[in-house]
Amino acid sequence: MATGEDNQSKEVSVAQNSLCHNDGYDTKCIFCKVVHKEIDTELLHNDEEISCFRDIKPGAPHHYLVVPTRHVGNCKSLRKEHVCLVEKMVEMGKTMLQKNGITDLDDIRLGFHWPPFCSVTHLHLHVLAPASQMGLMSRVIYRPDSYWFITVDQLIQRLNSQIETS
């Protein structure tokens, strides 16, 4: 019979594994399969930390997904120490836009679907441009300050306000 202490250590282990598996790969995750080239998707960028590819259902003329190359859970599983990762994802998204001729970085939308409103639990940043050309449904789906979509700034603010645990 498991003791309370055993249950607590199992919960901690499960929480750690939900963020990043030991090998950084989740065999059931479609984005892990994309970045490991098991699915025929053009990778616009792929290195040890960050990968980028086009969204299969674009909400704007330019719609990219920037993901950690190693499996990381959704944005609710992030902690304060992940701010640097989010910032790197943002920089990659902006770089990808600039490489593809988007110069007006004030007319973009950057953010994450807030669980349970995300279809893939691998952390992924939506990079959409020009935001002014998004259709009605995309404006709803990627609407800032909604229950289902959080901007990068909102996420970073939430993460920075977390109390550090030791």
Image: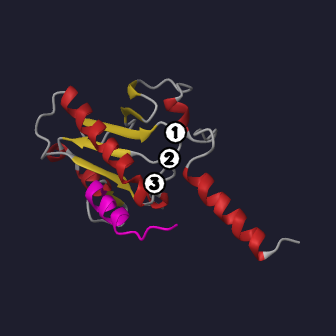
Q: Verify whether residue 36 appears in magenta.
A: no
Residue at the spot of label 3:
118
Along the line of sight, the residue nearer the viewer: 83 or 101 = 83
**Real-space Cα separation, disc 1 to disc 2, in angstroms:** 9 Å
- Quarter where residue 128 is shown: top left
The relative height of residue 140 versus residue 84 in the rendered view (above or below) is below
Please tell me in which quadrant of the rendered image residue 75 appears.
bottom left
At label 1, the amino acid type is: Arg
Number of marks:
3
Residue flagged by tag 3: what amino acid is it?
A: Cys
User: Residue 122, which numbered label?
Assistant: 2
- Rendered residue at 31%/65% (across/down): 146
Give the secondary structure at mark 1.
loop
Place of residue 97 in the rendered image (x, y in percent of width and height, measured from the top left) = 22, 33
Picture disc at residue 70: 1
Name the kind of residue labelled 2 in the image.
Answer: His
Magenta segment boundaries in residue numbering: 151-166
Outermost residue toward the front in this view: 166
Viewer-side residue, 88 vs 94: 88
- Residue 85 locus on image (x, y percent): 38, 46
Of discs 1 and 2, which sits in the foreground?
A: 1
C-alpha distance separating marks 3 and 1: 18 Å
Callout 1: few (<14), some (14-19), or many (20+) C-alpha neighbours within 10 Å?
many
| 129 versus 43 height, above or below | below
